[in-house]
Amino acid sequence: MNKRLCSAFAVLAASALLASAAQARSIYCCKDDRGIDACSDILPQVCYGRAYREINERGITIKRFDAPLTAEQRAEKEAEKKRAREEEEKRLQQERKNRALLATYSSEKDIDFMRDRTVAELENAIKHAQDKYDEVAKKQKKLADEAEFYKKKAMPPELKAAMRENDAEMKTQQAAIEAKKKEIEEVKARYEDDRNRYRELTGGKKPAAAASAQSPAARPADSRLR
């Protein structure tokens, strides 16, 4: 008798567990093409490729699933990630430049000094190029005067070669002069940018106050990140 009772109790317990498991099973629902809910205890086929939600035994939505991204949406998402990475890199790069700027200069006067020294070096290079140009131009004039004697007869090959080489040298020196002049303008603009950025970073503070605002990173000897 006891054995039969135990078996009956076991069957009832198993049935209760199965019923409880069935009641706790989630339901998955989505909207079909007509906007009607399609639901099942397994994901309905119509829900494939659509947004759907998981509902518990009490009818409460416990989780939502977005529809898979299209190829175009995936591409746009990757583009957004790339833009975010680029923006972050720009921000970090600007921070490095700011730290280098504050580590290089202790006042706006330092910026002016470096600018003037760099411009003076370029102007000196222009003077050397101009002297060389003038020297070659004088030589070219002498060669041109000599070529006057050969208006009615063939010019010696060596004279032609000398005039050609001189002309090329004049063009080289002229190009060097123009390049250095352009570089001077770029240098002035760059140091002006440094001055404005330094003033913005220090907020018009005195050198000592500006130094205290620097990063604890080691100060480089005389280098700037451009």
Image: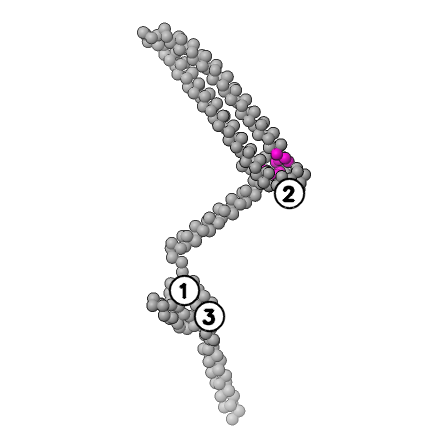
Prevailing secondary structure of the magenta residues: helix
> Which residue type does callout 2 highlight?
Ala
Measuring from the top left, give residue 225's x and y in whole percent.
Answer: 56, 37
Packing grade of label 2 (10 A; few <14, some 14-19, many >=20) is some
**Mark 3 burial class by Cα count in 10 Å: few <14, some 14-19, many 20+:** some
Q: Which residue is mark 2?
A: 213
Check the image and report above or below for 175 versus 43.
above
Disc on the earlier residue, 3 or 2? 3
CA separation, marks 3 and 2? Answer: 53 Å
* Residue at 41%, 17% in the rendered image: 167
Which comes sooner in the sequence, label 3 or label 1? Answer: 1
Residue position marked by numbered label 1 in the rendering: 51
Outermost residue to the right: 208
Amino acid on which the number 1 mark rests in the picture = Ala
Instruction: Name the image quarter holding residue 108.
Output: top right
Give the mark nearer the N terminus: 1 vs 2. Answer: 1
Find residue 209 and report its horizontal and vertical position in percent: 67, 40
Rendered position, 181 above or below 26: above
**Residue drawn 45% across the image and 51% down it:** 80
From this view, report whether residue 198 is shown above or below residue 162.
below
Furthest residue toward bottom: 1
Report which residue position mark 3 lands on: 61
The location of residue 137, given as percent across then percent down, is: 45, 14
In the rendered image, residue 102 lying in the magenta stretch gets the answer yes
Decide: few, some or many residues near mark 1? Use Cα within 10 Å; few <14, some 14-19, many ≥20: some
The x and y percentages for residue 149 are 36, 6
